[in-house]
Image (cartoon, rainbow, N blue to C red):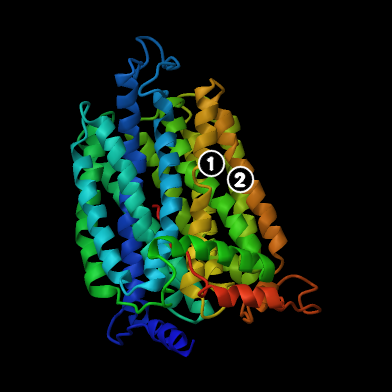
Amino acid sequence: MQQEQETSALSRQMPCLPTWPLYQGNREALGWALDGAARSIQFIGAGAFLSTSLLRMAKEAAGCETEPPPGETVISECNETIYGIKPSSLLTTYTMVVGVASSAMLPLMGAVIDYTRHRLLVGRIVSFVFTICILPTIFLNESNWFAIAVLQVVISFVGWAQTAVTYAYLPELTDDELLLGEWTKSFTIWQFISMVLFLAAVIGSVSVAGKDGDDLLTSQIAMSVAFAVNAILLPYVWVFLFEKRQPLHQLPEERSLWTIGFVQLYNTSKHIAKNYRSLKWFYISIAFSDAGIQALATVAITYLTDQLQFTARENGVAILLMLVGSIPGGVVSNFCSRRLDPIRSSQLALVLLIVATGLFAIFATGPDQYSRTYVLAFVWGIGVGWKWTCDRLLASSVIPEGQDTELMGVFLFSGQCLSWMPPLVFTAINESGVSQRIGVASLDVYLVISLFGYCFMGTYTKAREEVNRGTVYASRDPMADAETTGPKKANAKDIEELEAAPDITDAVHKSTSNK
């Protein structure tokens, strides 16, 4: 036990260079920011441009129209199938596959991080594979579109593995609650700024070249830039900035590295459910909110391309506005967290997302509705930037001390475990011939459930007290000063369970995203 505590303490000592100008000399904080920016550029390039081209090529391969007939502005509904599904179900289908596969992968990644010395090595390997897999997407054409779609599934899966390793470093960056809040806000803002610059560069170059309607060329330019950025930043981050870590725990002799993550995920979940009420509801809320928010990008691109007939450039503009909105969203998140607390701030962000999604399903009904689409995309961006900034702060601040890396794994698994559900529901709605607007509106179901989960968490002050931590954030609950909540005292059975298994461990992730 003493050896584990010394190992944990050693792993939390961050390299700090006084002459380094960013993040107070913390190289790993800089690495976290650069790694997130590089991955985000790839994910947004694939989502905004590559996906649009894949959808159009799938429709062409199925024999459907991709341009309106002469004298008309509306493309007729495509009811043909390709590989057993409608072309408009392509993106949600492969998103569903990625969701299931990555959920199964995360406990294994968590075991590697917790029980081996190979966290840095695994990060280097998956970042290399991630970068190399981007290269073939530059050469997308009509003859290889399906192979590129399959490759995109692989890229997304590897991207989640890399995100898992990266997120293991997040709670170890600093023990200062306010500083961590500032840094998580900074990470969110810089990731979205990098994506804004990327989208602006791609859209601008296509417009200057007079190729606004050429989806294939737009995709090729976007993926070329994404490959170049990742090929430069990721080797720098994983070779020079992130540091090695010692194992957090010793692998029991009777356990296998292949199964220990799943066993410990079960034990950890059961322990949290019995002893940490606020943390339990936080993870439940994350499961539903991340499922809805992650599906939003895929569902929105499908709807914009198939129903509103947006080109790749027009989809890029919509996503650009969403990302621009995410920047003030990160600022608003920090402001509301200080004025209220991070839990109340998350609730307000969810309300904004619920309203924006409902309005989009109601009012975005056909082609040429650019203005309302772009306005709602900007509002979506504010909500997403706001929510994800709060999530990162809460994930690091309402967990018991000494279990930071392990419980960050639970957070990442929670955010991914239901990611397959919204794409599955949307695909079922689309394949049955029901309006895609119903599929878009169905995303609000997950956000509403998440909102109720945050309500059950209680106040931020109580959530911190449950894990024996104080807080510098104010609570606006009038009863907060009259009541205190401590961790539930473990009974004999609980103690027996904890002693029978090694310490809390599990999956690690994005958050993103990929996220």
Disc 2 secondary structure class: helix
Q: Is residue 483 left or right of residue 514?
A: right
Residue 356: x and y in percent read 58, 43
Task: Count numbered badges in the picture.
Answer: 2
Going 53% across and 20% down the picture, which residue do you hit? Answer: 433
Residue assigned mark 1: 421
Residue annotated with mark 2: 446
**Could you tell me residue 216's position as x and y percent?**
24, 32
Q: CA distance from mark 1 to mark 2?
A: 10 Å
Check disc 2 and give the amino acid type.
Tyr
Q: Is residue 23 left or right of residue 390?
A: left
Could you say where residue 324 lies in the image, as x and y percent from the top left? 43, 52
Image height check: is 287 above or below 362? below
Which residue is at 76% across, 79% downward?
484
Which quadrant of the structure image shows residue 346? bottom right
Asked where in the image residue 391 lies, by quadrant, the reply is: bottom right
Foreground pick, 162 / 255: 255
Query: Looking at the image, which residue is at 33% across and 70% down?
Result: 119
Q: Assign a secondary structure to mark 1.
A: helix
Query: Which mark, residue 161?
Result: none
- Looking at the image, which residue is at 34% across and 22% down? 59
Q: Which one is in front, 407 or 222?
A: 407
Q: Is residue 453 visible?
A: yes
- Which numbered disc, 1 or 2, marks the residue that appears first in the sequence? 1
Task: Check the image and report above or below for 19 versus 286.
Answer: below
Tell which of 239 and 354 is nearer to you: 239
Q: Is residue 511 visible?
A: no
Instruction: Give the answer, above or below, for where 42 lies relative to 21.
Output: above
- Is residue 349 found left or right of 229 in the rendered image? right
Verify CB contact (< 8 Å) between mark 1 and mark 2.
Answer: yes
10 Å neighbourhood of mark 2: few (<14), some, or many (≥20)? many
* Residue type marked 1: Met
